Amino acid sequence: MRGWILDESPGEYRWGEVPTPEPGPGEVRIEVRASALNHIDLWLTRGMPKPRSFPHVSGSDVAGVIDMVGPGVSDWQPGDEVVMEAGITSHQAILTRGIDSIVDPGTHLLGEHRWGGHADCVVVPAWHPVRKPKHLSWVECAAYPVCHVTAWRMLRKGRVQAGTKVLVVGGGGGVAVASLLIANYLGAEVYATSRDEAKRNRAKELGAVEAFDSAGPYPVKVEVVIDSVGAATWEPALRALDSGGRFVTCGATGGVEVPLLLPRLFFKHQELIGVTTGSHLEFVQVTDHIARGLPVIVDEVFPFDAYPDALTKLAKCEQVGKLVLEH
């Protein structure tokens, strides 16, 4: 099969051929129709982290058509249209841990720890795909698994509901945009930040009450901060968090080390919550809400052979929403 291949890390992706994988027991093979970019695609080229083996194919967001099922698979047939979730866990973890199956120690990420979707096809456990929402395009389906499911879990862990005051930090990235959309969908009072004026204006178009320059200060007190940036906005974001508030973080694209004075946290009865992506049950919940009208925002669609151009745009943080490859 054709794909974008990483032969070493640090290194660069090359366009080439790799053996077409065959599904084993309990697995299905998906012929990929669209895949989306995430920062992990960039980090793998920098050796942060390194894939377990080479050659490697990245790509955590995948939508396509099942073209082969492995032994023991009865729930899927060739021709079924599906969307694949990014967090891979055992079937046992899903059954026993439920909505928190993502915290199972055996969890790994599609496109990081195993071959992902930036290729003609991908093999995955049969219990992870869900049926494609009929009204969505392939591009839209590829745009939501990582960002919307991560955002959904962050907002759930932050106990966001109608009327909750929420600050979404970094208004252009996939998780930030999804957080804004979902918080607005839930009836929250949403504020956003961005260093770019056009992105701040776009955040208000998408439902933010107001959008502030990322440099801060942010002239608002909120109950929940949703952060995917890290060090670059840590101080003004924490200052915006009210007493009893929840600071939920999932990323560190703006730096990994932050100062934290513990009395500042405990005297204000604040909570600091970490999230990676969501669980299988949360993926199912998000898909259901998207089928009922929760929006998905795609910034730009690239042809499959223009993956390097899409990576360049991602590295420059020029997008508002997701960058998607059409296969």
Image: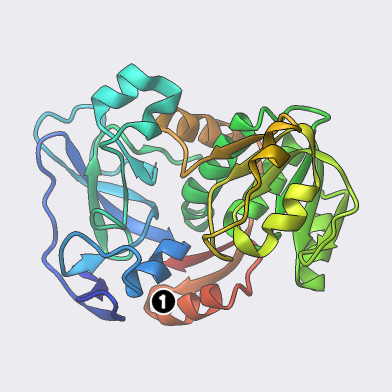
| Residue shown at the point (85%, 59%) measured from the top left | 217
Q: Nearer the viewer, residue 243 or 121?
A: 243
Amino acid type at image mark 1: Tyr
What is the crowding at mark 1: few (fewer than 14 residues within 10 Å), some, or many (at least 20)?
Answer: many
Position in image of residue 23 (x %, y %)? 13, 46
Residue 290 visible from this viewpoint = no
* Helix, strand or loop at mark 1: helix
Q: Which residue sits furthest top?
A: 96
Residue 27 at x, y = what percent?
18, 39
Quadrant in which the N terminus is drawn: bottom left
Residue 219 against residue 309 in the figure, above or below: above
Residue 41 occupies which quadrant of the picture? bottom left
Residue 107, percent from left and from top: 30, 39
Judged from this view, the residue extending furthest toward the right is: 219
Q: Quadrant of residue 245 in the image? A: top right
Query: Measured from the top left, where is residue 200 in percent x and y?
Result: 80, 64
The residue singled out by tag 1 in the image is 307
- Is residue 320 positioned above or below 290 on the image? below
For the C terminus, the quadrant is bottom left
Asked if 7 appears above or below 273 in the picture, the reply is below
143 or 69, nearer to the observer:
143
**For residue 205, side relative to residue 225 (left or right):** right
Q: Residue at x 29, y 77 (%)?
A: 10
Q: Is residue 184 left or right of residue 159?
A: right
Q: How many marks?
A: 1
- Between 316 and 116, the one nearer to me in the picture: 316
Residue appearing at x 82%, y 72% in the figure: 197
